[in-house]
Every structure is written in C-alpha cells, then in structure tokens.
Image (cartoon, rainbow, N blue to C red):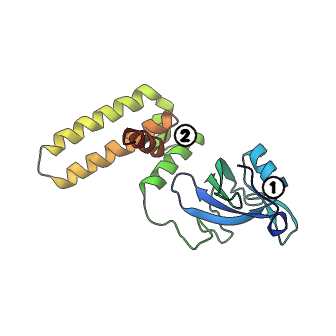
Amino acid sequence: MKPDFSKNNGLIPCIIQDDITLKVLMLGYMNEEALAKTQSEKRVTFFSRTKGRLWTKGETSGNFLQVVEIIPDCDAETLLIKARPAGPVCHTGADSCFAETGDSFSIEKLQAVIHSRKASPKEGSYTTSLFQAGINKIAQKVGEEAVELVIEAKDQNDERFLNEAADLLYHYLVLLAAKNKTLADVEEALGRRHT
C-alpha cells in the first residue's frame, strides 16, 4: 500500500521501532523524498520541520537507524519502520526518545549484542571468538550446553540448573545469529504450527 502524502502538508508521521527489542524509539515525519531516500539507502531519513530539509538520523552522531522493514498503517497515513539502531537514538543519549534508559537486561538486548559482535567483531570478546571459530564450533557448544543442562536438571541445585539454562540460551542465540536468524524467526515458525 502506497503511503498517502496528500494530508498534513505532504508529511506523514513515522514511528521507529527497534526490530529486535520491539521498543518504540522515536517519532519523525517523512515526505515522499525522505521516504524514497530511506528506501534506497536503507537508513532512516526524515523531513525536519524545523530545519526545512531532509535529515538522516545519525548524520552527525553516527547513530544511524538501519531499515529492516517499512509498514504502512491501515489507512496509509502513518509508517512503522522496524530498524536496528547503531547507538542511542535520542539526542539526550537515551536509547529512545521516550525516557527509556535501557538499563535493564533482556533477552532482546543480549540478542542485539550478539548480532552486533557478528557485524562488528570486538577483540577479546568471547562471542566474537565463537563467530570466528565457525558454525561447527558454535553448534558443538550448543550440544555441550544442552547435555550439561540435562545433567543439572536431574539434580536439586537450582542455581546450577539456571546457570546451565542461561549458557544454553546464550549459545543458542549465537547459533541463530550465525545462521542469520533471530528469536522472532523461531517465534514465526512456532506460530505457523498453530494456524
């Protein structure tokens, strides 16, 4: 569905959502030119109402928003852009423009760090070393961690069991990333089984 730019002086609101955590990061406005640039460059570009020109998010900070998907709403009057941020989105340094600090841990954040290590290897990082070792090593680690979890499940030590469960989940996320997949892809596969 083609966005309808005929209202609001040729501008439509554009909601930016983190593709991995699904948190709403910011709201901006696009005109047709901004949308075309966003689609061609795969980086979010807005029309700045205060500057009166196109503005690519991250052009000064380097914290670009890499486009994953662009979805118009049911009336084609608003866009939802799922993106991967290269750093804090808000000019205040916060993860989002809605006063979210991002201090709490989540599986989605862990997954984002793993994908970041794959895209930009970091010296001394265990995750980077796994990617460098290759898919066979990563798959082997998942197998090892699964066996260790099963062993701990038979005992009565909850702390050990949870630590092994955490190790398995971490290595599973690395394996997914190595195969260019995410938990959302797994969720989608599970969803297809229930239709």
Number of on-image labels: 2
Tag in front: 2 or 1: 1
Q: CA distance from mark 2 to mark 1?
A: 30 Å
Q: Residue at x 30, y 32 (%)?
A: 143
Residue 137 in picture, x, y percent from top left = 40, 28
Give coordinates of residue 30: x percent, y percent.
78, 60
Q: Quadrant of the C terminus?
A: top left
SS of the residue under disc 1: helix
Q: Which mark is residue 118?
A: 2
- Give the residue displayed 56% in from the left and 46% down from the top: 116
- Residue 113 is marked as none
Residue type at the position of mark 1: Ala
The image position of residue 40, as x and y in percent, is 78, 43
The residue furthest front is: 75
Indicate the amino acid at tag 2. Answer: Lys
SS at mark 2 in the image: helix
**Vertical relation: 160 (above or below) 89:** above
Residue linked to disc 1: 34
